[in-house]
């Protein structure tokens, strides 16, 4: 059953794991007609995303994409956009990373869009603080794209860990502090997914050396080690932030562990086709092919998306998103679970 409607609105920031239309609007100027589910247009999936399931469970309408100008954002907005990075374009240019497209969709841009939406939902500083204090903020996932651009620029594992991860985490904390300063009290912060389990990574960085793979999952160890390191650093930084801001509840939400569980024992979760093969793709060992990826000529869609974890070789199908959303609401993959935060807050 949905939790009693406790939040008046939800505001979401992030990348393609939570984009519900911004990329499509920014690149084509309009959203396709949006019938009810399925299929949810303008999402990187065959169905709903975690952010959709969270909204449904919390009794808030599905979040309108912020780029859809003229929308009423009084019950929330989604600023997430495909390809978004935690770091600014300038950082990549200064560090000779040219693989990044020149989109202005970084975390900082999303915070600027938030300021534009803010003007439409509240008028005085006091009213805004109260309004955002009754809203839920979901901040992330961020970092996955930053690291993938670094890999494309042939950064070493050591360089990604020592030079980029601390910068990404620092940037995220700055962004979370910015929404706390606006009055946010409850912030969910998702960590990174295990990039080494994702078909695009397994295809682009396939290795002859079996020791590069984790025998329990078939995932590439190097890419997962960065996600694990990012998540560990992020959790330490969130704990420090929580101590500095005792009036807020900051929730770390884990994408990594459930995905690894799917990869280890897919059948246990109903993924008969496993976790490493895309449902929609153009062939190859992981059904991911750069030249005929999902949506391009040569790609086909599987009959049973729910039997796959991966939708298009990068993003997930609806089934794992539903599972993950539940574990963030009820536990065990959110610290603390959102439902317990809501219950605690309703008691006081």
Image (cartoon, rainbow, N blue to C red):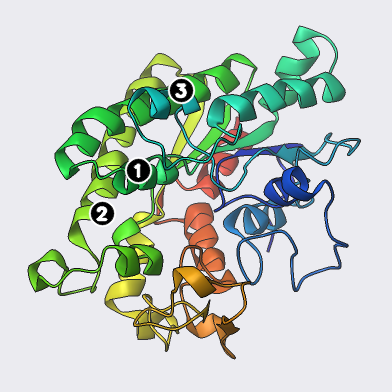
Residue at x 53% of width, y 74% of height: 292
The residue under label 1 is: 147
Residue at x 36% of width, y 75% of height: 276
**Label 1 near label 2: C-beta < 8 Å?**
yes
Q: Is residue 147 visible?
A: yes
Most foreground residue, 213 or 293:
293
Residue 43 placement: quadrant: bottom right
Lateral position of residue 28 relative to residue 254, left or right: right
For label 1, count other residues whose C-alpha is less than 10 Å away and answer few (under 14), some (14-19) or many (20+): many
Most foreground residue, 37 or 214:
214
Residue at x 32% of width, y 73% of height: 263
Most foreground residue, 308 or 100:
100
Query: How far separated are the C-alphas under marks 2 and 1?
Result: 9 Å
Lateral position of residue 129 relative to residue 273, left or right: right
Element on which disc 2 rests: helix
Q: From the viewer's perspective, is residue 163 above or below residue 194?
A: above
Disc on the earlier residue, 3 or 2: 3
List the single residue furthest toward the top: 125
Lateral position of residue 261 relative to residue 44, left or right: left
The residue under label 3 is: 90
Q: From the viewer's perspective, is residue 161 above or below residue 338?
A: above
Q: Which mark is residue 223?
A: 2
Disc on the earlier residue, 1 or 3: 3
* x then y, percent, for residue 219: 25, 68
For label 3, count other residues whose C-alpha is less than 10 Å away and answer few (under 14), some (14-19) or many (20+): few
**Label 2 near label 3: C-beta < 8 Å?**
no
């Amino acid at each position: 059953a949905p939790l009693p409607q406790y939040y008046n609105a939800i505001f979401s920031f992030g990348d393609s794991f939570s984009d519900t239309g911004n990329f499509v609007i920014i690149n084509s100027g309009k959203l396709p007609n949006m019938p009810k589910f399925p299929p949810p247009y303008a999402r990187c999936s065959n169905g709903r995303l975690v952010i959709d399931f969270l909204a449904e469970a919390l009794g808030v309408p599905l979040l309108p994409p912020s780029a859809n100008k003229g929308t009423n954002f009084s019950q929330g907005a989604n600023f997430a956009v495909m390809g978004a990075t935690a770091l600014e374009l300038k950082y990549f240019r200064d560090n000779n990373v040219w693989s990044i497209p020149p989109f202005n969709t970084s975390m900082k841009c999303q915070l600027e869009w938030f300021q534009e939406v803010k003007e439409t939902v509240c008028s005085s500083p006091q009213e805004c603080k109260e309004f955002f204090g009754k809203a839920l903020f979901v901040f992330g996932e961020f970092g996955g794209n930053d690291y993938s651009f670094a890999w494309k620029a042939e950064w070493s594992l050591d360089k990604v860990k020592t030079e980029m991860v601390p910068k990404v985490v620092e940037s995220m904390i700055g962004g979370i502090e910015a929404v706390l300063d606006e009055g946010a009290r409850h912030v969910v912060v998702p960590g990174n997914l295990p990039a080494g389990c994702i078909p695009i990574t397994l295809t682009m960085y396939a290795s002859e050396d079996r020791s590069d793979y984790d025998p329990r999952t078939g995932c590439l160890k190097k890419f997962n080690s960065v996600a694990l390191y990012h998540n560990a650093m992020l959790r330490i930084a969130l704990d420090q932030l929580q101590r500095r801001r005792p009036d807020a509840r900051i929730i770390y939400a884990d994408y990594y562990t459930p995905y690894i569980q799917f990869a280890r024992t897919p059948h246990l979760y109903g993924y008969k086709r496993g976790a490493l093969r895309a449902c929609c793709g153009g062939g190859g060992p992981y059904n991911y092919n750069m030249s005929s990826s999902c949506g391009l000529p040569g790609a086909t869609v599987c009959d049973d998306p729910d039997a796959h974890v991966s939708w298009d070789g990068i993003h997930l199908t609806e089934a794992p998103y539903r599972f993950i959303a539940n574990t963030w609401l009820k536990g065990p993959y959110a610290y603390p679970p959102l439902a317990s935060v809501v219950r605690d807050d309703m008691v006081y």
